[in-house]
Image (tube, rainbow, N blue to C red):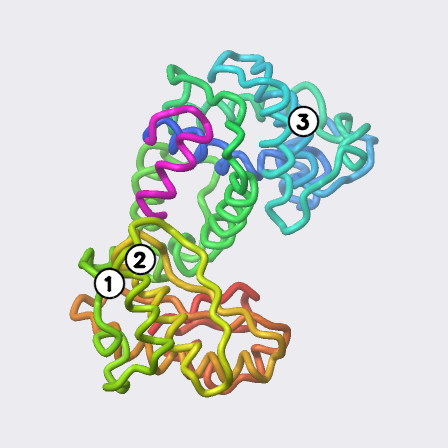
Amino acid sequence: MGDELRARWARCLSLDEQTAGRWIAFWAATHDIGKISPGFQFKSPSAKQQLKALGFAISSSPVLPHARLSAVYLQDELSDPRNGAWPAVSKKMAACVAAVVGGHHGVIPGAGELRNCRNSLGQGAWVEARSRVMTLIADEFSVAGSVPPCELIPEAGGFWLFLAGLISVADWVGSNAKFFQANGRWAGADVDWDEYRQLSQQRADDAVRQLGFGRWSPRKTGPLSFTDVHPEIQSPRPLQKCCVEIVSHTTKPQLVLIEAPMGEGKTEAAVYLADHSSHVLGGRGLYIALPTQATSNQMFSRIEKWLRQRYQFEDETQRINLQLLHGRTGFSEAFSELLKIAEIDTTETRLHHAIW
């Protein structure tokens, strides 16, 4: 996440950046708390026998999706923590966080879906187990003695979508056995917590780096010439020269509308403006939307070619993510080739980050 975005989301929560980061991490880490319930745990016959022996009772309530149960539990627990392991947030804030966390598999549950679900969480030992895990998570991210987030400020548009996306991607990365399963097995009940925590942090750092999510920082320079960004264009067209003039007076994010006949170099002009945003204004990348899959495929190849000549890193840890987003990406030879280079198996997940 870029510096400007971290500062923006912290302002949204009326917290300093470090405290905001702790709360966001705490919320994200609780996304699977609904798995500590009879319906989920008793799916495994061996786990069922062990848990029954430890006093975990079977529930006659319906078996519900664990994400929905996470939302139901957090809706109550965040606003009224039974063990005081973290400061309470308002009921409105708790409801919003719970809904977003409960949507980490792609669908944010509505109020109707969360109604009458609490019995499926289980009572007795289930309550104590969830409380213990929540306390461990709260301690891990040091939210116990911190200032709780306030209601979002009016300018906080997009925060909940950001949080939903962050949790979904973090869940995807954390579920990848390639990075987190050691010696062919997951952590068991006899795990040493301190050792496990340190090892997991290192693995998370490795996963983020290898997947290209590292904090790549573009060069902070003044406005570049059009030829600096597009070396193949030695004589920019009038429209393109106009864009150079625009950025020479630009110090803040802006909206630029370009209307011109075919062949005037609108795409190159737009890419030039996006490059300026990344290298001078602190932006993070670009997104190009086109009306059809065919035109998207064609543009994908053009942008790949441009990225190759624009960014040539000597440090192998610095990478640029390039993505093709439509329903038939699997039929794109250019995109499939990038996936092979990145060593990403298309059969494992539908979320791909092609890295070159």
Please give the label number shown on residue 205.
none
In the picture, measured across the screen, residue 202 lies left or right of residue 228, that is: right
Which region shows up in magenta? 1-17
Label 3 belongs to which residue?
Answer: 56
Comparing 39 with 152, the one in front is 152
Q: Residues within 10 Å of mark 2 (few under 14, many from 20)?
A: some
Residue 47 coordinates in the image, percent (x, y): 63, 40
- The CA span between labels 1 and 2 is 7 Å
Q: Of tags 2 and 3, which is closer to the observer?
A: 2
Image vertical order of residue 257 relative to residue 30, above or below:
below
Label 2 belongs to which residue?
Answer: 209
Where disc 2 sits, the SS reads helix
Question: Dividing the picture into quarters, in which one does residue 123 lie?
Answer: top right
Callouts 3 and 1 close, C-beta under 8 Å: no
Label 1 belongs to which residue?
Answer: 317
Image vertical order of residue 38 relative to residue 257, above or below:
above
Q: Residue at x 39, y 24 (%)?
A: 15
Which amino acid, mark 1? Answer: Thr
Q: Earlier in the sequence, mark 3 or mark 1?
A: 3
Q: Was residue 10 drawn as part of the magenta stretch in this picture? A: yes
- The CA span between labels 2 and 3 is 40 Å
Residue 288 coordinates in the image, percent (x, y): 49, 69
In the picture, measured across the screen, residue 165 lies left or right of residue 307, that is: right
Q: Residue at x 50, y 34 (%)?
A: 155
Residue 297 coordinates in the image, percent (x, y): 53, 82
Q: Residues within 10 Å of mark 1 (few under 14, many from 20)?
A: some
Which amino acid, mark 2? Answer: Arg
Comparing 53 with 83, the one in front is 83
Which amino acid, mark 3? Answer: Phe
Question: Dividing the picture into quarters, in which one does residue 270 lie?
Answer: bottom left
Q: Of tags 3 and 1, which is closer to the observer?
A: 1
Residue 129 coordinates in the image, percent (x, y): 57, 25
